[in-house]
Each structure stands twice: as structure tokens, then as C-alpha cells.
């Protein structure tokens, strides 16, 4: 079948529609059902510990749904009632729809042998299995429990964010699926055995073979991307580009993916079945550095001509645009970079720096940007926006 020709503008609009960013939020009150539906469409909310503005996993839903109660997301992920989200390694550590739990069993099984986990953790699991067993036994007996509550814990190692071997053992057990996140206390992970966190009916779901699990993840990635290269599809759930080549061929054979050519793209593109192409895009949104639209920096460059790198780990004197820089989406373009900070003590959202993309006029952007800054400030419980640009 002949590959479909797609213009760069069409590719952008397809991608924005797939990410629920082609138009403004509905304006309706956001309830738990809307939050769950949004997470399912995106497939994952990436988590990160930086809290200079607000925790990263809250921001993508603000961009797509408008102001919503953050406690709703907390309850769905870590509440004592009906859990519908769980934490695991999706795109990095993420909140994921609970029904996708069986699709990550292959990753859990590989982690058992130290594959796909950080080297320090793999080495610990290999060299000190008795420590791992002892930590797992204590969680089973005493959980839910934090790393700091373990009875036997050595001094921090100084590496890996100061993790002790016991914390690394907990993370290895989390990676293998033997432990899960029961809740978060001040963002610290509270561990418990998986059978007390993941509902039995979910753990009892049939587990497809590895190829089927990866096809399902690629299908979800394609739906969330709308259009993308093989590398884009692999990146969404951190799959191996080499390993997924036959999976993409299988999905193309069954019609889930359709080959396309995008002008200016060096690699072939894959169009998701059911992908929408809106006539125009009219959203205005501040995007977290960990938003699924922008977490793949090569794709952002290709789609929007927007060279983006996160600067939180860059020495201050080497930063170009600021510390916690959010791209500002207006229509189908990323038009500005906005460095924000929550000054909670003074009740203010600080606009620390603002940089416009080449060819973008300030007067065309500022009314919508100020609107979104005020919206964010109110959502965060802050009284005002202070501009220091």
C-alpha cells in the first residue's frame, strides 16, 4: 500500500489532536471520570521529584482539562478506595491506567535478572540477594513502609541521590513488580507487596506473551502520538527500537498502523488508526517539561522546530532560558519559554523569565499567556502573578 503524504502542518495538528491539545478545555467541571479518561488517552503521566512549581504529574491534566482538583488525581492513584491508576516504569516512572498492568509484566520479569534496570540496582540484586530477600520480608511483615522506616538501614551511600543499599533493594523489588507504591507521603514512596496494592482481579488478568504486550503498548503509544517515527513510538513507553521493529510490521499488517511520509522527516512515519486531523488547532497551554507532548526532544524539534532541553540539572551560569522552563503552546506552535516558580510563602506565581521564539510578537502572545498564568496561579492557590522579565 502506498504511503500517505502528510504535510508538516498536518503532522502537528494530528499530534496535537492525539494529545488532547488541539482545542481549549471544555469548560465543564472536571470530575474523576474526566481525569481517568484523560490519563487513559495519554497512556502515562510522568513523575518527577522537582517541586519548584508543582509536581510534574499534575500539570499535563491542567493543560488539557483546565483547573481540576489535584486531590482527585491523588485519590485515583493512591487513595484507599477504588484505585484506577498505578505507579510503574512507563515513560520513566509514571502513573499508568490500572488496566495496563499486564502489559508491563515482561518488563518486571526482565528486571528479575537485572535487565533494563539501573546498573547500581542490577549489581546490588546480583551481589547481595540475601539483602534483597531480607528487605522484601520486612515489607511483607510491616508494610506499607518507607525506606526510612526499615529496621536495618545503613548510612546513605552518597551516590544515586544518596540512596542506601536498602533503598536500592526496595527499588529493585519495585522494578520487578514484587513491591508496588501503596501511597506517597510528601512525595516519598511508600512500599508494600504488590498483592496488597494491585487489586486481585487485575493481577489475575491473562498475561499476553511478550510480543503481544509490546504490540499493545505500541498501539497505545501510536494513539497518543497520532503520528510518529518508529523511534517516536519506541520512546513513548521506553521500548527498545530494535526489538519493536517486528512489532511495528505486525501492527502495519493488521492495519493498526499505516505508513506515511511527512515532508522534511528523514525517517518514515506511522499514522495511528483513527488519528484525527483537525482543520486548525486553537489551544493555549503551559506545558510541563515532563509533558508527553514534549518529553521526546527529537520529536519536538521535528514537529515544531523547537530545540528544547531541560535545565534543572544545568549549572546556573550555563542556563539559557531559566531553571524550570515550560514551553507555551499557542495554536499549533510552541511560541515561548516560560520560567516559573511557586513562591508559596508570599502567595505568588513568579514569572522569572520569558523568551519568545524567533518571529513571534510579544503582543500576539501576552494576552493568552497572562490568562493561563492567572489560571495556574488560582489553581495552585496563589493570589497573584509577579512578572520579573
Image: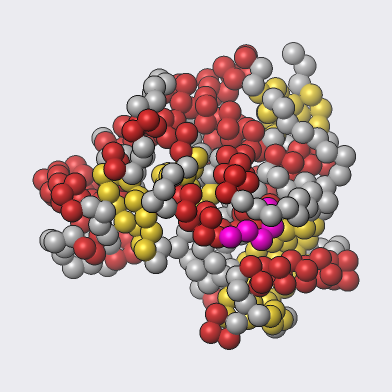
The x, y position of residue 177, in whole percent, is 31, 39
Task: Give, as a single range, the part of the protein colored magenta.
Answer: 65-69
Residue shown at 27% from the left, 59% from the top: 146
Q: Classify 103 as above or below 252.
A: below
Residue shown at 68% from the left, 77% from the top: 351
Q: Would you say residue 68 sits in the magenta stretch?
A: yes
Residue shown at 74% from the left, 13% from the top: 1
Given residues 35 and 308, the one toward you in this image is: 35
Q: Is residue 322 visible?
A: no
369 sits to left or right of 256: right
Give residue 336's quadrant in the image: bottom right
Q: Classify 312 as above or below 271.
A: below
Given residues 183 and 173, the one toward you in this image is: 183
The x, y position of residue 152, in whole percent, is 12, 61
The x, y position of residue 98, in whole percent, is 46, 38
Q: Is residue 260 visible?
A: yes
Amino acid at each position: 500500500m502506498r504511503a500517505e503524504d502528510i504535510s508538516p502542518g498536518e503532522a502537528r495538528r494530528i499530534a496535537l489532536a492525539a494529545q488532547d491539545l488541539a482545542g481549549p478545555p471544555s469548560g465543564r467541571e472536571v470530575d474523576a471520570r474526566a481525569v481517568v479518561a484523560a490519563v487513559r488517552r495519554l497512556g502515562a503521566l510522568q513523575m518527577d521529584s522537582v517541586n519548584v512549581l508543582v509536581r510534574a504529574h499534575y500539570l499535563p491534566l491542567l493543560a488539557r482539562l483546565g483547573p481540576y482538583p489535584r486531590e482527585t488525581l491523588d485519590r485515583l492513584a493512591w487513595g484507599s478506595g477504588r484505585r484506577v491508576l498505578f505507579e510503574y516504569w512507563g515513560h520513566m516512572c509514571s502513573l499508568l491506567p490500572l488496566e495496563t498492568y499486564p502489559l508491563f509484566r515482561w518488563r518486571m520479569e526482565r528486571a528479575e535478572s537485572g535487565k533494563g534496570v539501573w546498573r547500581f540496582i542490577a549489581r546490588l540484586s546480583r551481589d547481595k540477594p540475601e539483602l534483597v530477600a531480607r528487605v522484601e520480608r520486612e515489607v511483607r511483615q510491616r508494610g506499607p513502609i518507607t525506606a526510612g522506616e526499615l529496621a536495618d538501614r545503613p548510612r546513605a551511600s552518597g551516590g544515586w541521590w544518596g540512596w542506601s543499599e536498602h533503598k536500592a533493594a526496595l527499588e529493585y523489588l519495585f522494578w520487578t513488580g514484587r513491591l508496588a507504591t501503596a501511597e506517597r507521603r510528601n512525595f516519598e514512596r511508600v512500599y508494600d507487596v504488590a498483592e496488597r496494592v494491585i487489586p486481585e482481579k487485575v493481577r489475575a488478568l491473562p498475561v499476553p506473551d511478550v510480543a503481544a504486550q509490546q504490540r499493545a503498548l505500541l498501539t497505545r503509544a501510536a494513539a497518543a502520538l497520532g503520528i510518529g517515527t518508529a523511534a517516536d513510538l519506541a520512546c513513548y513507553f521506553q521500548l527498545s527500537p530494535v526489538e519493536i521493529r517486528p512489532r511495528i510490521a505486525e501492527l502495519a499488517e493488521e492495519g493498526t498502523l499505516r505508513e506515511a511520509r511527512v515532508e522534511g522527516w528523514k525517517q518514515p512515519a506511522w499514522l495511528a488508526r483513527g488519528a484525527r486531523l483537525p482543520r486548525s488547532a486553537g489551544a493555549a497551554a503551559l506545558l510541563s517539561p515532563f509533558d508527553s507532548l514534549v518529553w521526546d526532544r527529537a520529536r519536538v524539534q521535528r514537529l515544531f522546530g523547537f530545540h528544547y532541553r531541560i535545565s534543572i540539572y544545568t549549572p546556573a551560569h550555563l542556563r539559557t532560558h531559566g531553571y524550570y522552563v515550560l514551553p507555551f503552546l499557542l495554536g499549533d506552535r510552541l511560541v515561548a519559554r516560560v520560567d516559573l516558580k511557586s513562591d508559596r510563602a508570599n502567595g505568588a506565581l513568579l514569572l522569572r523569565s520569558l523568551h519568545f521564539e524567533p518571529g513571534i510578537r510579544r503582543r500576539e502572545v501576552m494576552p493568552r499567556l497572562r490568562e493561563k498564568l492567572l489560571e495556574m496561579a488560582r489553581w495552585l492557590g496563589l493570589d497573584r502573578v509577579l512578572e520579573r522579565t
